[in-house]
Each structure stands twice: as structure tokens, then as C-alpha cells.
Image: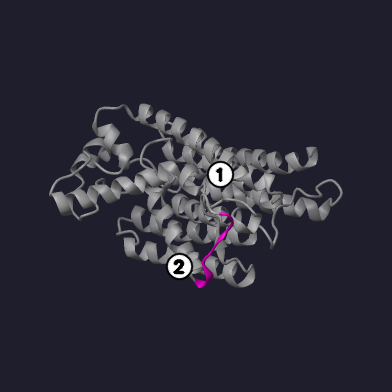
Amino acid sequence: MTSEVMQIFLPATVAFLIGVGMTPFLTHFLYARKMWKPQAGKIALDGSPATEFNRLHESREVGTPRFGGVVVWGSVVLTAALLQVMWVLFPDSFDGLAFISRSQTWVPLAALLAGALAGLLDDLYEVQGRQGLRLRVRLGIVAMVALLCAWWFYSKLEVTAISFPFSQGPVELGWLFIPFFVLVALFIYAGGVIDGIDGLAGGLFAAMFSAYAGIAFFQQQFDLAALCASVAGGLLAFLWFNVPPARFYLSETGTMGLTLLLTVVAFSTDVLGNGKGITVLPVIGLPLIATVASNILQVAGKKILGRKLLRIAPLHHHFEALGWPPYKVVMRYWIVGVVAAIIGMTIALL
């Protein structure tokens, strides 16, 4: 048991240290080249100017670089590569610590990198003063990556069912498993807009991946647990520099990669791990679910009732508009996120 625990905690620690160590070099590069939006301002979901958001955040959008997500996925990739090399060079000392494996982590790592690189392109467009990738393009990329992952689960791993609350066993979906997988990925990605206040997204994603690391560990999917733990370590390194005032933002290269990875991990800890990874995703990912739901309600209110239901969407900005200081919103979201992660992990292990 001691070696198995080390297999989880060591990658998390290494990823944290790598993330902290690489940040000074990254921030020097980002600030030297002014890698932030050249012009502040945001457009609402309906195409109109986001007046309330711009009042709250316009002054912070210029002068703070994007690309903070590089710290997260960069530290994870470097940790995975380092432990793999050390295992090859010193197989006796590092046996079991290398977590790159075809059966558990190839697909999650591929999803993380595909989303991160696509998000990196969007961030590059943004800082060059060009329009970033259009929403439909980003959704198309997420759907395509999710489709490939779903095909791998369905065709190679022969996963055609999902766990479901209160059912006697897994619910068989057949080929519908593939579109269901894609829809879940799109929904979780839509929650990535929670990266809107200094420190908010980093703390919440760290709680989510820590919960899934625990779930995978108790399913004896140790490589997957180590991957989730290293992501949590990378997120804590990012968070060290993202607390107010943020040195950089997670931005699209972070949120697209992390939300795709979270989707794949949830399915990997479901039927594939004889668990309830999908069942508990709405619980562990409650802040993301609330974010998407608030956006949907805001749009529905405008279309159906002719008025906004919230001062501003998503929900965390609504609390800001009510007069809550940003740190108060972040701290309370962290509390809710940690409690939701604990409850979700508990349900998954029952």
C-alpha cells in the first residue's frame, strides 16, 4: 500500500515543483512580449456588449498575460516524461512510478494535449489582436476530440454502457454511447468559462481532479490516479501565481485541455473501472454545472421573458455584480467545490 500511495503523491509533488520552477521563465517570456489582450472588453452570449462584465473586469483584461494553462499541462507532461525516463534508466528504483500506459492514460493524455494545443492557438490569436477561434470552431474541436475518444472507448475498449443512479447495473447505450460522450464533453467544456476571477478555476479544478484521483486509486487504476494527481499538482502550482493579483490567466489553453481531460477521466472511472465516474460527475463538477446552467437560464430569460434573470452570467459574476468582493466569491466557491468533491468521491466509493 505504501508504494501505491507513493505512486500517487510523488507525481503530484513533482508536477507542483516543476510548475513552480517553470513559472518565472514563462512569466518573463509572457510579460516581455506583452502576451495579453491588446484591447479590453467582452461580448455577451447574445452578441451585445457585456456592459456589466466590462464594468467589473475591463481594467484587468489588459496587462495580465494569458497562457497560464501552460503551467498546468506543461508540468504534467514534463512529470510524465521525467518519471518514464527515470523508470527506463533505473527500473528497480522507479518501478511503478511511471504512469504512461496504453490501458489507462494514453487517451486522457491525448485529450489533454489536443485541447491544450487548440486552446493555445486561440490564445495566440487573442493576444495578436485578431479574433480568437470562433465559438463554433472551438465547439467543433472539442466535439471532434471527444468523438475520437468515444470511438476508442466504444471500439477498442468495448465500453457501451454507463453507470446510472438507482439502477441495478450499468445502463446499456450501444452505439448511443458515442454521442452521449460527445454531449458530456461539450457540456463540461461550456463550464470552462468559470475561469473568470483570479484563483477561481485553479482551486476548483484542483479539487475535481483530486477527487477523481481518489476514485481511480480505490479502483486500482493507479496510472490514471497518478495522472489526475499530477494534474492537481500542476494546478496548485498555477494557483500559487494566480491568486490575486493574478500573474497570468488559465485561459483557453488551460480550460479546453482540462475539461476534455475531466470528461475522459469521468468515463474511465465509470464502467471501465467498475465504478460510478459519470454518475458523480455532476456532483464533483457542480461548479461547472452551475456555470452552464446559469448561462442557459440567462439566455432563456432574455428570449422567453424578455429580461435577464441574473445581473450577469455566469453565476460567479452575478455575485460580483451584487457587490461581493472577488475574493469572497472565490473562497466560497472553493468551499462548495471541495465539499462537492468529497461528496462525489464518497458516493463513488459506496
Determine which residue is flagged by label 1. Answer: 209
Image position, residue 209 (x, y; %): 56, 44
Residue 197 position (above or below residue 262): above
What crowding class fits label 2: few (fewer than 14 Cα within 10 Å), some (14-19), or many (20 or more)?
Answer: some
The amino acid on which the numbered mark 1 sits, given as a three-letter code, is Phe
SS under mark 2? helix
Residue 165 position (above or below residue 242): below
Q: Does residue 217 show up magenta in the picture?
A: no
What crowding class fits label 1: few (fewer than 14 Cα within 10 Å), some (14-19), or many (20 or more)?
Answer: many
Tell which residue pokes out farthest to the left in this image. 306
Magenta stretch: give its range.
168-175
Image position, residue 267 (x, y; %): 56, 57
Q: Is residue 349 left or right of residue 303?
A: right
**Quarter of the rendering occupied by the C terminus:** top right
Image position, residue 34 (x, y; %): 38, 46
Q: Is residue 338 left or right of residue 287?
A: right
Residue 172 position (above or below residue 339): below
Q: Residue at x 57, y 67 (%)?
A: 160
**Quick one: label 2 or label 1, which is nearer the N terminus?**
2
Q: Residue at x 28, y 32 (%)?
A: 320
Determine which residue is flagged by label 2. Answer: 179
Query: Disc number at residue 316?
Result: none
Q: Is residue 265 visible?
A: yes
Where is residue 128, by image quadrant?
Answer: bottom left
Which is nearer the eye, 61 or 192? 192
Q: CA distance from mark 2 to mark 1?
A: 24 Å
SS under mark 1? helix
**Quarter of the rendering occupied by the N terminus:** top right
For discs 2 and 1, the disc positioned in front in the rendered view: 2
